[in-house]
């Protein structure tokens, strides 16, 4: 058992479980070069974008097929050792950390498109393909996969965390867009959930149970997702506002009117400044909405006119349009780089991300009080939000070695989540529970619901080997 | 233990479990007049729209609150007696039948709207409210609940079976539209799943696990669903075609082009004839699509023009428009009455309904061969379909006492399901598995997935008291 390399801030007390040498030998015998125990490889698989520091896994297996995954899980099961699926490591919540020790199961080499069914608007992929790679590969079909969490995450990781992002306000989340899965169970059995039919009432919704289960109920080895025709017309616009409140009220009214806006993202003035610096842009350093409209040319025009009218009522400036694909890409890259821009604005910092999501009518209440609190704390932060869904992220930029700053940030986070729950919301709109939100999950759903989750986990993974120690203590 | 009143056609062999007199006494003591053992009441709760005949439950409890439900379940648990939730009895698959004996838990008196959150487009209701009653009660908000399975089912029953229906092509199914639930577990504990937030990554998706679980994992006592703004413009049209194939090809192309059509229903010439007779209409007795377009006036116009153009290519007649709400209601009532019209066309008959759903590109392959087969069989039938989703229903109108007819119908059903599964579809798009599709579920998902369902069931309901004997044998 290794000693922790740094204090396990806010992590539940858990034992690192033994990884017997016999398991490593068996993995090396089965996987040869595909199994690594090199420290640099293990360390790369022992961290993610969260601020936790945990000892790395004892070995990394690079799976290249469902059979590889099944064999690795069967060996882990035989030795009762944790196995943690790994894609590109973009989790913000510590999902990939070996808190109880064990092995990392890297599926990034399983990155093929298995079949495109353009006529049915579906595609089946392996879990290690990233969303950008997928969209690149299906470009010629005139279809696209809309879910866009910012990072170029894998489809497997996005499925496991029930990810969403900027397009969800129109196209839904992974919950709505995953049709079927192939999954390796805790005993190494390969099962299929769902079919390519658009809807089904065939028994328990195992697909939806796996979506968002964070690697704790099975290892996802194939995913069938819905695709959408590339919209005939796309227009993107930015609009600056005199206050965050004005931007938020514009959003609320847009949603309540049922405008089928494809994206509506809030970026606060702090974050605009960081983005300007990082991406060499000259956006007006005021709270801003970044919007996108999809549809037929007349529908896009109608939508944009309606939203422009609402924005003016709240003091928004005239829309600045990005009408060519290049301009649009530049704007969205700026938005997607907000996280990196922010982290770079304070060298050596780590971001603690909040992820609350509230009913749209409560968005202003939830957000504005937290802005006041955070400003008062003196902790640098960024603020971006998929506000059309009532979801937003503060990123508290802390010095990871400063216990006081961390405590302050956690206190802000705690106040924000408490407020969101009181307003009928959730502690996590899209990042997942991982290590960081276990306590909040309990506050949100109550002990009865968490017990039900735990009962399901115990039944499906009796040896507790699948990404143990995440979502709830076990 | 009662003897079966009629042969249990195609039902798995199960034992009726004992219902001790002490339980009945305890229920009477706790519920007084709300508990009935009168034969007429028990018989009314011992059947549904399926063609199975099973002995009625030993008692019926009329719950008026979550506490009533929890107390009834606790008593059932104490005596290890099955408890079967009951709404209005519109199940087509035998969900409500006491195949292992036990008590019926009628929630139809729990039919209140608990809170309307018009600004967030959500409403929280009790399970016994029907969809028509719900829409009546929220009329003044300018919002509506779109899911429409035809029958005026309860929202609880629709949740339990993952229902959908005519509007699903645009608005999704219960899977997409249920946000949160209150559920009484097998031990009588009350838990909450989900919040009013539009999206969440907070742990296992217990909401989706309960949606479609057919009363086998918990008794649903509160449901929060999404609402939608009443569309600014609504137009309904019918279009007759020279063949079923022409109607189906029109549908496929409409969906593949991404037209956001709100409803597109196929009715074959047989069924048009039955509907004409039953509803005193004079629709052209040819295969017909019944369509509805929702949106802004320009968007509705655009959609309708596109579809009209496609229809003409396949030989469809000019659209006949129903532009007033009254005309629309008349048309849709005719569609919704298709089932009753069909059943009445052969006095004394029972309908065996199929419910396959396939990827849209396979719809013609799946449907046309089955039409040929069914015509050849000589069994009277109706055919309607939510074809925009790839879902359609044959209703074989059999004499329930004629074993030969029943066997023929089951054989047709079997061929149809086999074909649908081969084409990447599901045996049930919206009715659920119930008693009738257990074998098909196994064919569809494989033993591994059914075993996983069974493991979850055993873990959450160790005494097997919640609607036992449905979905899979246990």
Image (cartoon, coloured by chain):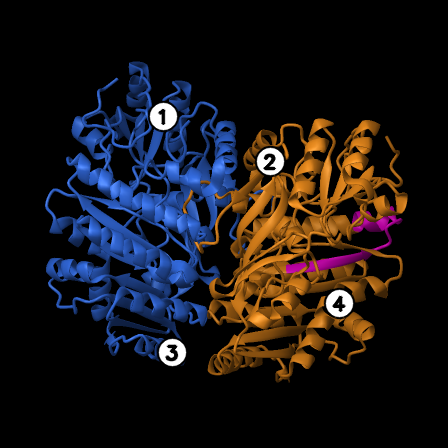
Chain colours: A blue, B orange
Disc 2 versus disc 1: distance between alpha carbons? 32 Å
Does the CB distance between marks 2 and 3 fall below 8 Å? no
Measuring from the top left, give residue A42's x and y in whole percent.
22, 29
Q: Residue at x 75, y 67 (%)?
A: B337
Disc 1: CA contacts within 10 A as few (<14), some (14-19) or many (>=20): many
- The residue where tag 2 is placed is B189
Give left or right: position of B93 versus B35. Answer: left
Q: Is residue B386 left or right of residue A60?
A: right
Q: CA distance from mark 3 to mark 1?
A: 53 Å
Q: Nearer the viewer, mark 2 or mark 4?
A: 2
Report which quarter residue B454 is drawn in: top right
Q: Which residue is mark 3?
A: A306
Sequence-first disc among 3 and 1: 1
The residue at the point 12 percent across, 42 percent down is: A348
In this view, the residue in front, B69 or B450, is: B69
Pointer 4: residues within 10 angstroms few (<14), some, or many (20+)? Answer: some
Q: Chain of mark 1?
A: A
Chain letter of disc 2 in the image: B
Report the quarter where the N terminus of chain B lies.
top right
* Tag of residue B337: 4
Stretch in magenta: B392-408
Distance between mark 2 and mark 4 Cα atoms: 40 Å
**Residue A13 can be seen in this image:** yes
**Marks 3 and 4: same chain?**
no
């Amino acid at each position: 058992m290794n000693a922790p390399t740094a204090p396990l801030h806010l992590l539940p007390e858990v034992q690192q479980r033994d990884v017997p040498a016999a398991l490593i030998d068996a993995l090396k015998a089965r996987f040869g070069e595909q199994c690594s125990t090199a420290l640099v490889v293990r360390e790369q698989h022992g961290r993610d974008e969260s601020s936790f520091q945990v000892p790395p896994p004892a070995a990394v297996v690079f799976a290249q097929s469902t059979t590889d995954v099944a064999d690795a899980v069967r060996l882990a099961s035989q030795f009762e050792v944790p196995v943690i699926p790994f894609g590109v490591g973009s989790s913000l919540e510590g999902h990939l950390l070996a808190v109880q020790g064990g092995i990392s199961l890297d599926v990034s080499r399983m990155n093929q498109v298995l079949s495109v069914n353009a006529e049915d608007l579906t595609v089946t992929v392996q879990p290690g393909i990233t969303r950008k790679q997928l969209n690149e590969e299906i470009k010629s079909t005139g279809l696209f996969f809309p879910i866009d969490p910012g990072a170029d995450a894998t489809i497997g990781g996005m499925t496991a965390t029930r990810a969403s992002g900027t397009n969800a306000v129109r196209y839904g989340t992974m919950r709505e867009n995953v049709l079927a899965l192939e999954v390796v169970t805790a005993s190494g059995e390969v099962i299929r959930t769902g079919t390519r039919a658009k809807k089904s009432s065939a028994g328990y919704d195992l697909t939806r149970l796996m979506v968002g289960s964070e690697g704790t109920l099975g290892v996802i080895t194939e995913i069938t997702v819905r695709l959408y025709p590339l919209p005939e017309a796309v227009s993107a616009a930015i609009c600056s506002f005199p206050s965050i409140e004005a931007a938020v009220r514009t959003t609320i009214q847009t949603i309540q009117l049922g405008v089928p806006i494809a994206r509506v993202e809030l970026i606060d003035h702090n974050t605009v400044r960081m983005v300007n610096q990082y991406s060499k842009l000259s956006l007006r350093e005021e709270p801003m909405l970044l919007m996108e409209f999809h549809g037929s040319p007349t529908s896009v025009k109608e939508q944009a006119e309606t939203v422009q009218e609402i924005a003016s009522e709240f003091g928004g400036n005239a829309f600045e349009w990005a009408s060519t694909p290049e301009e649009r890409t530049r704007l969205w890259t700026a938005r997607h780089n907000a996280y990196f821009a922010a982290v770079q604005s304070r060298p050596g910092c780590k971001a603690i991300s909040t992820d609350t999501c509230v009913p749209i009518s409560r968005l202003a209440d939830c957000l504005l009080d937290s802005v006041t609190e955070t400003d008062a704390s003196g902790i640098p932060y960024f603020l971006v939000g998929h506000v059309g869904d009532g979801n937003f992220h503060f990123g508290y930029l802390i010095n990871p070695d400063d216990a006081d700053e961390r405590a302050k940030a956690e206190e802000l986070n705690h106040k924000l989540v408490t407020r969101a729950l009181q307003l009928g919301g959730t502690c996590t709109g899209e990042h997942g529970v991982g290590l960081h939100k276990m306590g909040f999950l309990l506050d949100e759903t109550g002990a009865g619901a968490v017990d039900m989750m735990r009962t399901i986990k115990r039944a499906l993974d009796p040896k507790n080997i699948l990404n143990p120690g995440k979502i709830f203590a076990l």
